[in-house]
């Protein structure tokens, strides 16, 4: 990944570089940042990456990159709030128009990018549900970037279909958390429930909880990518095993379940009761017909 002079912390650079190494940008990315400027900078970088003509994306010097970075690219569109809305939200009509526009071929590049700034403020639930179908079945080479201060403001069904990038190094994933997440995934796939229960003990470490759950979700999203014929960003073998055992529907259910657990932990839920519940729900999803 060529950062073209953009300045990001090492954790953000690592997350973006791992996406670039997979050879493809996820079709939907949630950019979570307390800094609006950082979120917009990252959206600009990813947009330039999507339309760049060079192999070393984004090169920053090709015509596509120059237009993207000067906010003058016809295939990069920022969705503004409905002018009729006093509360500054997107309207149902805008989402319907967006779905139609997404079917139209790009004007100049090989891809189109739609940017939703302040999506956590401008995207009511009804409009998110209307957007969901497009998010589930996007046309080829269409990318959506949703900028938020907190991804929790978006529906779980939206979050589960997006890759989340957090700028500023929040919730950095330690090597220990990555290993614990792999053990949880292995436990989910194991015929012995005890292995999963044992792996869940890692969540009792409050300093690692967020990182472990984020890593679990990343593995599950990699499995979705594998099912679609793409390359996993991290552990390809683990993604392949998940994809061979789980349907797309089951993987999405597990992502939403993990997201729900993350939220409950932030509400100081009893960790023993929560891990027992989480273990049972993972097994239920795994074995349901």
Image (cartoon, rainbow, N blue to C red):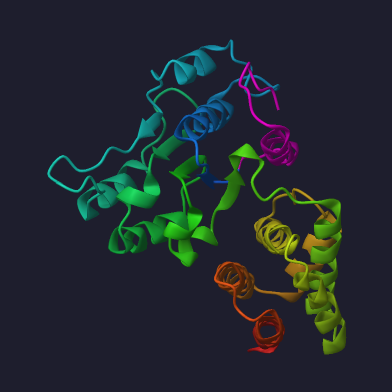
Residue at 67 percent of width and 62 percent of height: 217
The total number of labels drawn is: 0
Is residue 210 left or right of 70 when viewed as pictured?
Answer: right
Instruction: Tell me the quarter of the picture where residue 162 sits.
Output: bottom right
**Spot occupied by residue 6 in the image (x, y as percentages of width and height):** 61, 21
Left or right: residue 24 compared with residue 152:
right
* Residue 10 in picture, x, y percent from top left: 73, 33
The answer to which of 85 and 275 lies nearer the viewer is: 275
Residue 189 visible within the image: no
Quarter holding the N terminus is top right
225 in the magenta segment = no
Rendering quarter of residue 154: bottom left
What's the magenta region?
1-25
Question: Which residue is drawn at the image coordinates 84% and 72% (left, top)?
Answer: 186
Confirm whether the magenta stretch covers residue 5. yes
Tell me if residue 286 comes above or below residue 56 in the rendering. below
Q: Residue at x 46, y 51 (%)?
A: 138
Quadrant where the image shows the C terminus: bottom right
Measured as percent of width and height from the top left, residue 233 is found at 75, 48
Residue 247 x, y percent position in the rendering: 65, 73
Q: Determine whether 242 is above or below 218 in the image.
A: below
- Residue drawn at x 78%, y 78% is 188
Regarding residue 41, the answer to whether it shows in the image is: yes
């Amino acid at each position: 990944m060529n950062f073209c002079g953009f300045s990001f912390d090492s954790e953000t650079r690592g997350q973006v570089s791992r996406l670039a190494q997979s050879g493809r940008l996820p079709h939907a990315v949630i950019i979570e940042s307390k800094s609006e400027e950082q979120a917009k900078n990252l959206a600009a970088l990813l947009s330039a990456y999507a339309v760049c003509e060079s192999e070393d994306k984004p090169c920053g010097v090709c015509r596509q990159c120059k237009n993207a970075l000067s906010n003058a690219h016809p295939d990069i569109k920022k969705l503004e709030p409905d002018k009729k809305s006093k509360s500054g939200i997107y309207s149902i009509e805008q989402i319907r128009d967006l779905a139609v526009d997404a079917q139209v071929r790009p004007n100049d590049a090989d891809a189109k990018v739609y940017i939703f700034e302040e999506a956590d403020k401008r995207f009511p639930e009804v409009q998110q549900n209307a957007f969901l179908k497009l998010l589930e079945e996007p046309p080829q080479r269409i990318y959506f970037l949703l900028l938020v201060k907190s991804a929790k403001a978006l529906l779980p069904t939206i979050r589960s279909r997006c890759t989340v990038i957090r700028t500023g190094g929040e919730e950095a994933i330690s090597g220990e958390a990555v290993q614990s997440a792999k053990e949880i995934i292995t436990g989910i796939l194991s015929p012995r429930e005890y292995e999963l229960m044992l792996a869940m003990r890692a969540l009792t470490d409050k300093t690692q909880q967020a990182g472990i759950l984020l890593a679990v979700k990343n593995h599950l999203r990699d499995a979705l990518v594998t099912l679609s014929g793409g390359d996993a960003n991290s552990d390809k073998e683990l993604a392949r095993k998940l994809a061979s055992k789980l349907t797309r529907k089951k993987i999405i259910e597990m992502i939403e379940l993990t997201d729900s657990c993350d939220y409950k932990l932030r509400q100081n839920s009893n960790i023993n009761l929560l891990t027992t519940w989480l273990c049972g729900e993972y097994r239920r999803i795994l074995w349901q017909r």
